[in-house]
């Protein structure tokens, strides 16, 4: 009889805990879902050296293949002509000859931003193809990439 009462009382306690356990699991699931599948996606942010002539920036090697890319540029010296293009590669230890355009040419006579998606690459650079006139014209580009 004592044995039976012990197990019944433990069973009753478990019956009371089951809804609480279910609520805790539900809250944890909803919280994880609300953050989305890419909530903790790694990203890389890099400001390339300021460019004051027609040239390509050094190649930034990415830790993994990124498919979403943003570049933002600032200009100084009031150039009347400025164009740049985001380039990428999938080659390990790339050189400038391995780089290909993954974005369209952007006019950069004033500050701006450009986005490229669905282009998986493991290395990026910015190619400044035009930089003319103004007083010591220069452009500084910041890159942000993610999966």
Image: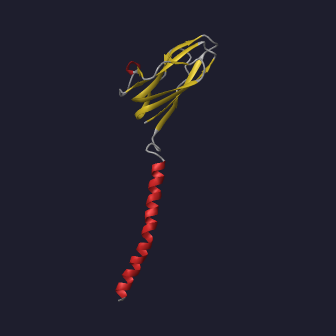
Residue 124, located in which quarter of the rendered image? top left
Residue 109 left/right relative to 129: right
Name, please, the residue furthest toward the bottom: 1
The answer, for residue 59, to whether it is visible in the render is: no
Considering the image in quadrants, where does the C terminus appear? top left
The answer, for residue 10, to whether it is visible in the render is: yes
Q: Is residue 19 above or below residue 129?
A: below
Q: Nearer the viewer, residue 99 or 38?
A: 38
Q: Total number of numbered labels?
A: 0
Q: Is residue 5 above or below residue 48?
A: below
Q: Position of residue 19 (x, y in %)?
A: 44, 67
Q: Position of residue 104 (x, y in %)?
A: 46, 20
Q: Is residue 96 above or below residue 69?
A: above
Residue 1, located in which quarter of the rendered image? bottom left
Q: Nearer the viewer, residue 12 or 110?
A: 12
Residue 7 left/right relative to 48: left
Q: Residue at x 42, y 33 (%)?
A: 66
Q: Position of residue 47 (x, y in %)?
A: 54, 29
Identify the coloring: secondary structure
Residue 6 left/right relative to 35: left
Q: Residue at x 43, y 44 (%)?
A: 37
Q: Residue at x 48, y 53 (%)?
A: 31
């Amino acid at each position: 009889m004592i044995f039976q009462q012990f197990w019944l009382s433990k069973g009753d306690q478990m019956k009371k805990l089951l809804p609480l356990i279910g609520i805790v699991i539900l809250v944890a699931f909803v919280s994880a879902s609300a953050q989305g599948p890419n909530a903790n996606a790694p990203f890389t942010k890099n400001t390339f050296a300021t460019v004051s002539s027609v040239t390509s920036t050094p190649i930034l090697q990415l830790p993994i293949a990124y498919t979403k890319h943003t570049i933002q540029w600032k200009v100084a010296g009031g150039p009347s002509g400025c164009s740049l293009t985001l380039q990428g590669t999938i080659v390990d230890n790339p050189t400038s000859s391995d780089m290909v355009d993954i974005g369209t040419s952007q006019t950069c006579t004033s500050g701006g931003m450009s986005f490229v998606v669905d282009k998986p690459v493991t290395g990026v650079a910015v190619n400044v193809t035009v930089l003319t006139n103004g007083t010591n014209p220069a452009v500084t580009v910041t890159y942000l990439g993610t999966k």
